[in-house]
């Protein structure tokens, strides 16, 4: 990996003033910011990052650090043996280099005490993002270790953006990439969330995903004032809607109806938002056939990644509906239900047993009868790999 020296000359390019990264840090004395249409009471706590008060008068800091990690921090972390496995030269825990070390997130940093040499300008932040995101494809470590490293270092990137008050197309692209990372992590962590450690990672990842989205919507609102837009805007707005499917997501700021009322007509009418609203409506109405068919036919790759951990929750809810409906002598064949719920028959049988449903078998046809009093919602729901479409449905 080439060194990032010589990049500081480009700092300040495309800078926009007036954004304080609302709620990025402790919030002490932070000046007011305009409320976005997307999150009227949300805050830029997205990064969990920084921005102490500068009295509202001082110009933002202009970063001059040419590397992914400031030299002073590199030296200190070498002394303290505080190097992640991805930052070590030859695996040595006390030796790193400018091409490996990445600045850590710091909770106590403030814009009144930080030095410009400790802050990375926008071009370096972009290179840092490219470097850490490529680690997602590495196979030498468990995903939880990879996630922990990228999780912390992307917060640091957002922290540097906040301190410098940078809001422009490049900063928005960085935030969109961070959200993409959290969505991919949301999918992969959910598959192993039966483990208690993974479960806590799932929650923290979801929390940062939600905060990043609200921050991104604030940034969208600011660039709209200059008649600028992101071509990914409508898809990222749809993520916020789809997150309302989950039972274990962080509490939302506003009701969806209020949130919708503050969005522009082009966003509401976009195919991504129409898809998200259709999915949410089908879920609440219990129209599970249309729910799964619409996902299979229309979901983007990221939308499907975001939805995957919620699919079995929907299937369990569908089983509850099927159990409460019909007559005891009217059996529900698993093969037919598996086509409706787009899951393999064997996996559906496992879900039925987790819900306390007794399965009968007659001439190789597995089924369950409704009105079973033993039905219960399982405390832990296994995760499968998304949508399964049988060959019969594909013909």
Image (tube, rainbow, N blue to C red):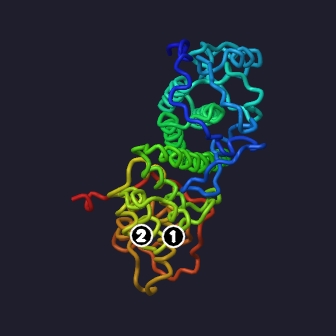
Residues at circles 2 and 1 in contact by the CB criterion of under 8 Å: yes
Mark 1 nearby-residue class (10 Å; few <14, some 14–19, many ≥20): some
**Residue at 38 percent of width and 50 percent of height:** 300
Q: Front-most of 340 and 37?
A: 37
Camera sees residue 265: yes
Q: Residue at x 58, y 56 (%)?
A: 39
Q: In the rendered image of this protein, does residue 40 appear above or below residue 147? A: below
Residue 360 place in picture, x, y as percent = 44, 74
Say the numbered circle drawn on residue 111: none
Whichever of callouts 2 and 1 sits on the residue coming sooner in the sequence is 2
Label 2 secondary element: helix
Q: Nearer the viewer, residue 257 or 74?
A: 257
Quick one: SS at disc 1? Answer: helix
Q: Which residue is mark 1?
A: 317
Whole-percent x, y for residue 217 in the image: 53, 49
Counting other residues with Cα less than 10 Å from the Cα at mark 2, is it few (<14), some (14-19), or many (20 or more)? many
Q: Residue at x 41, y 61 (%)?
A: 265
**In the rendered view, would you say 322 is above or below 276?**
below
Which residue position is annotated with label 2? 288
Tell me where residue 13 appears, x and y as whole percent: 51, 26
Front in this rendered view, residue 294 or 357: 294
- Report the side of 34 relative to 387 (left or right): right
Q: Residue at x 61, y 37 (%)?
A: 151
Which corner quadrant holds the C terminus? bottom left
């Amino acid at each position: 990996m080439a060194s990032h020296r010589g990049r500081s000359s480009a700092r300040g390019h495309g800078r926009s003033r007036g954004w304080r990264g609302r709620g990025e840090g402790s919030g002490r004395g932070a000046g007011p910011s305009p409320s976005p249409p997307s999150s009227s009471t949300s805050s830029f706590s997205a990064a969990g990052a920084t921005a102490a008060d500068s009295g509202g008068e001082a110009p933002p800091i202009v970063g001059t650090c040419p590397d992914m990690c400031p030299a002073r921090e590199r030296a200190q972390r070498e002394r303290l043996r505080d190097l992640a496995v991805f930052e070590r030269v030859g695996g040595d825990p006390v030796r790193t280099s400018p091409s490996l070390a990445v600045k850590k997130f710091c909770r106590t940093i403030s814009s009144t005490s930080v030095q410009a040499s400790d802050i990375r300008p926008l071009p370096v932040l972009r290179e840092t993002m490219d470097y850490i995101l490529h680690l997602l494809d590495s196979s030498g470590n468990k995903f939880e270790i990879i996630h922990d490293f990228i999780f912390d270092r992307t917060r640091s990137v957002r922290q540097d953006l906040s301190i410098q008050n940078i809001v422009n197309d490049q900063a928005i692209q960085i935030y969109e990439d961070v959200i993409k990372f959290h969505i991919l992590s949301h999918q992969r962590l959910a598959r192993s969330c039966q483990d208690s450690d993974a479960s806590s990672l799932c929650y923290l990842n979801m929390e940062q995903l939600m905060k990043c989205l609200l921050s991104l919507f604030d940034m969208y609102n600011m660039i709209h004032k200059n008649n600028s837009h992101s071509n990914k805007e409508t898809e990222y707005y749809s993520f916020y809607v789809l997150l309302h499917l989950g039972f274990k997501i962080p509490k939302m700021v506003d009701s969806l109806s209020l949130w919708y009322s503050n969005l522009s007509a082009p966003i509401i009418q976009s195919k991504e938002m129409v898809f998200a609203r259709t999915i949410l409506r089908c879920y609440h109405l219990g129209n599970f056939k249309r729910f799964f068919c619409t996902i299979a036919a229309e979901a983007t790759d990221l939308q499907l990644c975001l939805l995957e951990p919620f699919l079995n929750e929907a299937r369990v809810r569908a089983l509850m509906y099927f159990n409460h409906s019909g007559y005891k002598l009217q059996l529900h064949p698993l093969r037919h239900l598996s086509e409706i719920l787009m899951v393999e028959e064997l996996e559906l049988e496992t879900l039925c047993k987790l819900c306390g449903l007794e399965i009968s078998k007659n001439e190789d046809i597995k089924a369950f009868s409704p009105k079973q009093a033993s039905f219960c919602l399982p405390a832990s729901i296994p995760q499968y790999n998304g949508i399964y479409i049988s060959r019969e449905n594909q013909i």
